[in-house]
Amino acid sequence: MTLESIDKKFYHGLNIGEKLGEGQFGTTWSAIRHDSAPAEKIKKTRDTSETDDNDLKRLVVKESKGSIDFNEYRVVLGLKPHKNILSLLGLAVVNGKYCLVSELCEYGSLDKLHQKINMTESKTFADIAVGICRGLDHIHNTLEILHKDIACRNVLMRLDGSVVLSDFGMSRQIQADQTYYSISEGNVIPWAWSGPEVVLEGRFTFASDIYSLGVTFWEILSKGNAPCFEGKKLNEFKTLAAICSVIHKVANGSITAKFPSTIPKSTASFVRSCLHPKPERRPSVANLLQSALKIKTIANGSGTQITLTDSFLGNDRV
Ligand SMILES: Nc1ncnc2c1ncn2[C@@H]1O[C@H](COP(=O)(O)OP(=O)(O)OP(=O)(O)O)[C@@H](O)[C@H]1O
Ligand SMILES: [Mg+2]
């Protein structure tokens, strides 16, 4: 993508609305667009036919906490779009700072949706799982990048119920807090969503994204519970030593995820496969998508019962 094409993606005259939230990387607001549209429209940018031009009026702007990296913006704005990936539309200047402009997902992030939607219901879970897997399949196999921050807070739902992955390619310029922990200088990670090899060795791979995906599925099936270890909440782990000590137990299999008794065994084993302590034993996202599609078929009441665990072995994408 050239500098001219990034210029065409500048939004002028946005009306900034409510603050949607503040994360590790910056602050997010809703915004309403007036007539001065960028040349490139969402219809072209997003791989979908359902969107009409009205959707373009309501957008989201995200101000980055760290310093602005134009090259990074140029790269993310040039990525091939997909219907399960948040549409990144362009840039705007808000309060004198460059902000990334994206589509607004009306239902917001899954971590805040449990009061409104029962996402543990088999069909709903299957639809969400298929959508997330399709998005991650695009990130891993088409874009060939890692997400590095998969969690319910970064899965958004549109008005039509479809889900998108947001905030991929995690920045390093962030502050540590109870969710993000600095494992070494300049390397801050959401430790409870990260595979043991990430926390203990700083090793990010396609398989470490799969582990985070497993934690995300667990969050959904647990109706929005945050991960906890040996009955302790994340904010009770104050030091790197305390985190490493508990993660060693995850790595040797003495701490494993627990699921509510109402969750079907096949669904629990689908999620457990992602949470395998050994990265090489986790499924690739392509395998996982096939399993999610089988779960969806079963949830829709057709097809025969399938042993999901059979297809989980033999992943070579680590
Ligand atoms: N495109 C969007 N459409 C609708 N709501 C959004 C959108 N992007 C973000 N939000 C909402 O804004 C909140 C803040 O998002 P933000 O990405 O800044 O932080 P976060 O996701 O909580 O943490 P992280 O730093 O891990 O991304 C989210 O919780 C989500 O509910
Ligand atoms: Mg986010």
Image (tube, rainbow, N blue to C red):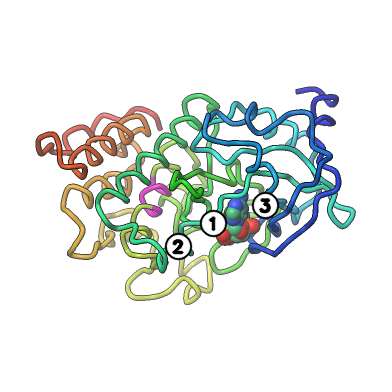
Callout 2 touching callout 1 (CB < 8 Å): yes
Instruction: Identify the residue under disc 1.
Output: 108
Q: Earlier in the sequence, mark 3 or mark 1?
A: 1
Q: Earlier in the sequence, mark 3 or mark 2?
A: 2
Which secondary structure lies at badge 1? strand
Report the Cα–Cα distance between label 2 and label 1.
Answer: 8 Å
Residue type at the position of mark 1: Gly
Q: Position of residue 295 (x, y in %)?
A: 23, 41
Q: Position of residue 312 (x, y in %)?
A: 24, 35
Report the Cα–Cα distance between label 3 and label 2.
Answer: 32 Å
Q: Give me the disc on residue 186.
A: 3
Instruction: Identify the residue under disc 2.
Output: 113
Q: Ligand 1 within 8 A of label 1's CB?
A: yes
Indicate the quadrant containing the C terminus: top left, top right, bottom left or bottom right.
top left
Q: Is residue 164 visible?
A: yes
Residue type at the position of mark 2: Leu
**How dense is the environment of label 3, judged by Cα within 10 Å: few (below 14), some, or many (20 and up)?**
few
Q: Is residue 131 left or right of residue 88?
A: left
Which residues are drawn in magenta? 211-216
Q: Residue at x 29, y 58 (%)?
A: 120
